Amino acid sequence: MKDRIIRAFAGTFILTSLLLAHYIDSNWYWFTAFVGANLLQSSITKWCLLEVILTKLGVQD
């Protein structure tokens, strides 16, 4: 369950930042890059802040 929530958050953040960059200001691409870098970091280190938060909130795997 946590994996699905994390993927949903990441996908929503990426799509939202792309829309904001297209319609509002191109600096929103930096947020897209941040989300991508965070995904890359979590795949290497196997640590994700959102996973820790979800665990503390009682979300099961």
Image (cartoon, rainbow, N blue to C red):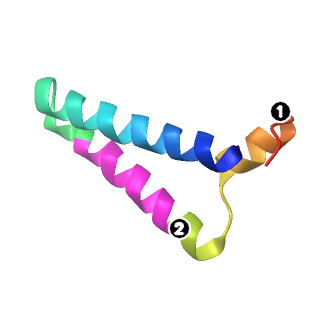
Q: In this view, does 54 lie to the left or right of 21?
A: right
Q: Where is residue 31 in the image (x, y as percent from the top left)?
A: 34, 43
Residue positioned 83% across, 43% down in the render: 60
Q: In which image quadrant can residue 58 be found?
A: top right
Q: Where is residue 38 in the image (x, y as percent from the top left)?
A: 49, 58
- The 10 Å Cα crowd at callout 2, few under 14, some 14 to 19, many 20 or more, is few
Q: Of helix, strand and loop, which mostly describes the magenta segment?
A: helix
As shown in the figure, which amino acid type bears the numbered disc 2? Answer: Gln
What residue sits right under mark 2 in the picture? 41
Mark 2 element type: helix
Q: Which residue lies furthest to the top in this view?
A: 24
Could you say which is closer to the camera, residue 15 or residue 27?
A: 15
| Magenta-colored stretch includes residue 36 | yes
User: Spatial distance from mark 2 to mark 1, Cα to Cα?
Assistant: 23 Å
Who comes first in sequence, dot 2 or dot 1?
2
What residue sits right under mark 1 in the picture? 57
Q: Where is residue 13 in the image (x, y as percent from the top left)?
A: 41, 37
Mark 1 element type: loop
| Magenta-colored stretch includes residue 47 | no
Q: In this view, does 38 lie to the left or right of 57?
A: left
Residue 46, compared with residue 12, is above or below; it is below
Q: Is residue 31 left or right of residue 1?
A: left
